[in-house]
Every structure is written in C-alpha cells, then in structure tokens.
Image: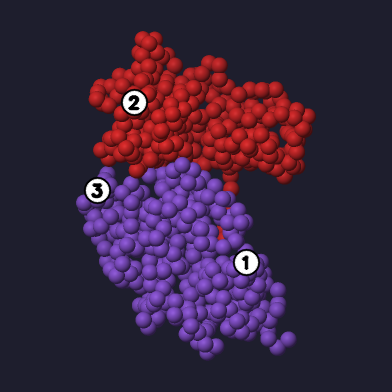
Chain colours: A purple, B red
Amino acid sequence: MTIQFNKETFRDDYSFRNSDWAIKRFPFPFHEDSYMYSVNMEQHRGGPPGSVYEKRFDVDEHYLAEMEDRAIVLAEDPLRCQSLPHMTLAGWDTLELIMTCKSEDYPDLFELHRDGKRWRWVNKPMGIDHSFTFLDETTLPCGPLEYITRQTQGDFAVLDQRDEMLWMDAGTVTTQADWSLDFDIGMNFFEWHAPVPMAHELGIFKRALKFLLNVQQGAPARRLNWTMTVNPLLDTSPENYHKWGIQKTTLTPENIGAKQHLRVELQTFFRLPRSNALLFPIRCYLIAFQDIVSVPKWGRRLHRVVRDLPDELATYKGFIANRPMMLDYLGQYDDGRPTSPGIWPDLETEPPLDMGR
Amino acid sequence: MTAAPQNTKAGAEKIAVTVSAVVPLNDLVTRFEFTRPDGAAFPPFSAGAHTVVEMRDQGRTRLNPYSLMSDPSDPSIYAISVRRDDQGRGGSLFMHRNVKVGDAMTLTYPVNLFSLDLRGRKHVFLAGGIGITPFMAMIAQLEQSNGNWELHYACRSEALGTYADQLRSHYPNKVHVYFDDQNQAIGLEDLLDGQPLGTHVYVCGPKGMIDWVHTTAAEHGWPSENVHSEEFLAPQPGKPFEVRLCKSDITIQVGEHESLLEAMERCGVDAPFLCRGGACGQCETDVVEADGEFVHRDHWLDDDDHACGKKIMPCVSRFVGKTLVLDR
C-alpha cells in the first residue's frame, strides 16, 4: 500500500486530520468499559494487516508532518535529544534496528544497503540518500540516535540496564505527554515514575521493572498508555507548558468535538543487541473526539471510561477540570447498550447509536 | 490489550545452527563453533551474553547455558567453549562425546546477565578456569572501541590454561596469567588498591573465587555496583520428590538427576525460564502449600524469600518433605 502523506501541522493553525483509514486503525486503548492501571504487556510480534501493531515501527500518513514538527522542536530546544557518553553504542543499536526494520517492513519507502561497515540508507519520503560507516560517528551529520530519530515517528527513551535497574540515559523526546527528558536524564525507573499516582501502591512499577529487565533480544514487547490533549499538539512538554496548558481553558460545548483529542501511546520495548540497553519507543497517536464517536462502540466505551475514572487519574492526566464538559459531549453517544469485548472497532457487528430508546 | 494471537513459549527465541568446527583446546576444554544453515548473519550480541544450547540426548532434552566467546563484531559465527565435567549431569559430556562437525543444533538468542558497564573508565577482568569465556568476548568488544582493560587469569596449570597463550601473545601488557601448580595467585588486595576512579571489576569462575572478590572489594571500600560477577549453577541431584502443580492440575515426580524445572517440562508444562542457572529470576514460582524443607540453591531470591518458603526457583532448587503445591 502506498501511503499518502498529509500536509498538516501540530501547532498554530492545527491542520492535523485523521483520514478514514487512520480513524479505523486508531489504537483505541480500552478493551473494556472501565480503566485501571495494569502492566498490560504483550509481545510485539505483528498484528492484523493494516493495524498499527503490524509493523515493528509503524509509518502512517502523519510521518512527514511529524518529522517537520520534531525538527522545529529540536531547533528551539536542542536538549530534547540527549545521550550520556556511555550510550553512543546504544544509539548505533537504535539506528541499526530502525533501519533494518523499516527497510524490511516498508521496502517501497526505505532501503538499507550494507557492505561490511559501509552502509547506504535511502529514505524516499524524506528525500535522504546517505552513505556512512557503521559505528563511525564522524560519518554522520549528528549522533546516531539523533540521526535516526529525526526520521522516525515517536519519542525514544534509551534505557541503560545495570544493577538490576533501568536508567534513562539517552533519548529523543519531542512528542511527550508532559514529561521531560532533560529533567529525567540519568534517573532510574522508580525515580522517573515517581509522579504517577496509585500505581506505586498497586505494585505496578515493581512488576513492570521485572518484566522489562527480562525483555530479550528478538522478543520485543508492547503496551498502550493514554491521556487527553486539547488541540492536536504533539509537543505537550513541561518546557512549553506555558504555551499549551492555557489551551485547556479554550474548550466549549461547541468546539469540544473537534478540539479535544484522545492521545494514545503505543509503547514498545526492544532489547538492543550490542549495548544490552533497552529501547523504549513511545509512539503518539491523536484522535479528535468527533472522530472517535464515529465508531459507535468506541463512543459508548469512552463515555463510560471517562465517567468512571478515579479522580486521582483524571487529575494526573490533566483533564479533571474539563471532565464534566467531556461527559456532556460523550454522553450523547452512549445509548447504554453493551459493548463487545476487545479494542477493535467492530463496525460490522456493533449496532449503530440508538438514542431514541 | 491483546492485539494479536500471542506466542508465549518459555525461554528465549531460538536459532537453528550447524556445528562448523569442534576444536579441542586441552584435556578438558573444547571449542564449538556454529554457523547458520541458511548462511544468514547471526544476531549481534553484547559481550558477556550466553546462549542456551539444546541437546537431543537419546530422547532426553538437555538445555545448558554457555557464554558466547566469539568476537561480537563477527556475525558469521557463534562460538562457545565447554569444559568437560566428568561428575556433572551429562550435558558437557554429551557435547564432548556426541557433537560433530555438520550436526544440526538449536541455540537460543543471546541473553546477557553479565554485561559490561559501559560507563567504566577501566575494566579489570578476573577469570578462574573456564570462567575465561565471557572475557574473550568482552576483550574483543573493548578492543574495537579502544577500551581500557586488563585481565588476571588463574588456571590450574599451563596445560589447562585455556586461551592463555593466545591472550598473552596478543596482549602482552594487559594479560596476567597465574598457575596454581606453580603457586602463583592473583594479588587481589594490591590489584584493587591501585585502580583509578571509575574502574569496574568483573569476576567469573568458581563460587569461592567470586565470593572472595566480592568480599575483598567490599572490605577495600569498593561500591558493590562496580563489582560484577556471573556464576551459572548446575542443578544438583537430590532425593526424588513429588509436586502438585495446581494451575496445570497435575502431580509430577521429580527424579534424582533432574531439576524441578526439567520435570515440569518433561510433563508438558510450559514453565518460563531463561538462564536455567538460578540467576535470571525468570522461573520464579509461587508456593501454594508446603510441608517439608526447601533446598534453595539460587542467587535470585534473597535470604528473606528463602526463609519464608513462599517462592522457589525450580531451575536449581529442590524440596524434601511430604507435600509441595506450586502455583504453576
């Protein structure tokens, strides 16, 4: 399938849109009508054809626009990409993994030609054709992590593994849900998760760490996480909170369907072979409420999840103030009918909305 | 979230290989080299990683972990060196007696429980006997990146100094070999005393040597994070015992010469594992009921866990008593 890349923005005029294709393949994160934290890990070994789970690094219609947005963020704030000195090898690991996966999974878009350490990388959508020497930083215009993540959707945290612990020692983070690489750099797994409410008490992080320390080469894993974002902003960083935080007050009953977005992260975990570090890509997918409710099952379910979410979580995810307005809007799309289990849209089998009952 | 059917077989991913060379190094140690039958490159690995070798021994499957000792930058082969253990459970004897060039075998993907701390400004390797193998890969990796390292290698005798000559001739200023039969020994206290800030120490060898290095380093004020070790335990034989596996709804017998994990596998229970040597924690199993004594032999659970009897590592630990019920 050839992807038509959108010309769109994630700032200023917010021209970002999801096509019908993108709506149907959206990674809806709720497999039932309620939500609570869980480790919810599964293997990252493909998924149904066309779904965001199919390829190791999903490329979609937003690719070029997301890369333009990343370039703007990095130009304004170079500290969004950092790598502690011992993480260079993990950066090369990341470059190798992404180039290998993309050239195998999207041969019409990406090519990797290897002759020993002489590599040629072709990225057709971005118009890049570059030869370099693997493991020789002087042959790249920037570090290997920055080089490849300027060409790959999603944020990337690169976690060093030592002393039975994971350490946030490198990354490229420009599309984040209100956390900062510059603040977290060098922290361990428990330190950077310290702000999350409730999950510590539930023992979630202890179990998650144990799982992640054992993610093995050749057996990547994945999970979904979610939050809410007003306007299709990729860069909801603490650094720029003064710019985007205020936008949460601009919601009205009239504009909420278009402005309020569900923000879903497809988080994947890859053991990096040469450095033994753990690569943690965090891929952000945005969808407007008005597009979610075009799928009857998702409209019903999102209303119930948002309604029943504990206050601590609604506060942490930053939408407690707007929750009543969200519920007024979403309630119009919940006719009280049961929903089918699982995350899929089930457009053929789920009944259309029936508010006349 | 279950987006796809899940294949959750226990253990790491597997690689089909062909034995490409069998090289006897001395009376006890033989190197085995593997290539892929399709000629493909092996997955890259990090120095210190091991692979679990699957052996088909007359209807019995043996799974033994061995450190990868080939150069991590050479994707054309994987190599291991196996010390023959005449008193052992038979895995090393099978390798020495039965494995021939051209044989088809199965390895797991590399798993690293003994990786270099890449922050280290200097890496000091302490090897005892066959414990030299992970350091062969570490030295190759550090040589590629101009890393600062030195090796102190204790062997029984010149005749049993596996790779000692090769290492000394390649790196005469970095390799120090000590022969027990010539009353030579690593001067550990002096060695630890003279290291620059940012040095990491790695030890691989017999249990006594590992304990000695950890204790001595601690006495000299070394932070425990700068002292790394790896010791694979082989499961030890013990009295047969019976176990009830409540999730699987079966009762199994563990024989004298098999581990609890092996007994589960023999009975068709797909129990998780990685290292099979009491180090990785993957096979940790909850105890539902126990009337008897545990024989804990792992490095994974702490003393409190061992004392409370709520968990067991079935790869190396056993049980003596009337009733044992596990949540598996």
Nearer to us: label 1 or label 3: 1
Considering the image in quadrants, where does the C terminus of chain A appear? bottom right
Give the chain of mark 2: B
- Residue A35 got which mark? 1
Give the chain of mark 3: A
Element class at badge 2 = helix
Residue B225, compared with residue B124, is above or below; it is: below
Is residue A5 shown to the viewer in this render? no
Give the chain of mark 1: A
- Residue A206 got which mark? none
Considering the image in quadrants, where does the N terminus of chain A appear? bottom left
Looking at the rendered structure, the kind of residue marked 3 is Asp
Nearer to us: label 3 or label 2: 2
Query: In this rendering, would B64 be left or right of A143?
Result: right
Pointer 2 local density, CA inside 10 Å: few below 14, some 14–19, many at least 20: few
Residue A245, compared with residue A284, is above or below; it is: below
Mark found first going from the N terminus, 1 or 3: 1
Q: Residue at x 43, y 50 (%)?
A: A167
The answer as to whether the residues below labels 3 and 2 share one chain is no
Element class at badge 1 = loop
Q: Residue at x 33, y 69 (%)?
A: A73
CA gap between label 2 and label 1 equals 56 Å
x, y percentage for residue B125? 36, 29
CA gap between label 3 and label 2 equals 34 Å
- Residue A136 got which mark? 3
x, y percentage for residue A123? 30, 62
Q: Which residue is mark 2?
A: B191
Looking at the rendered structure, the kind of residue marked 1 is Tyr
| Residue placed most toward the observer, B241 or A4 | B241
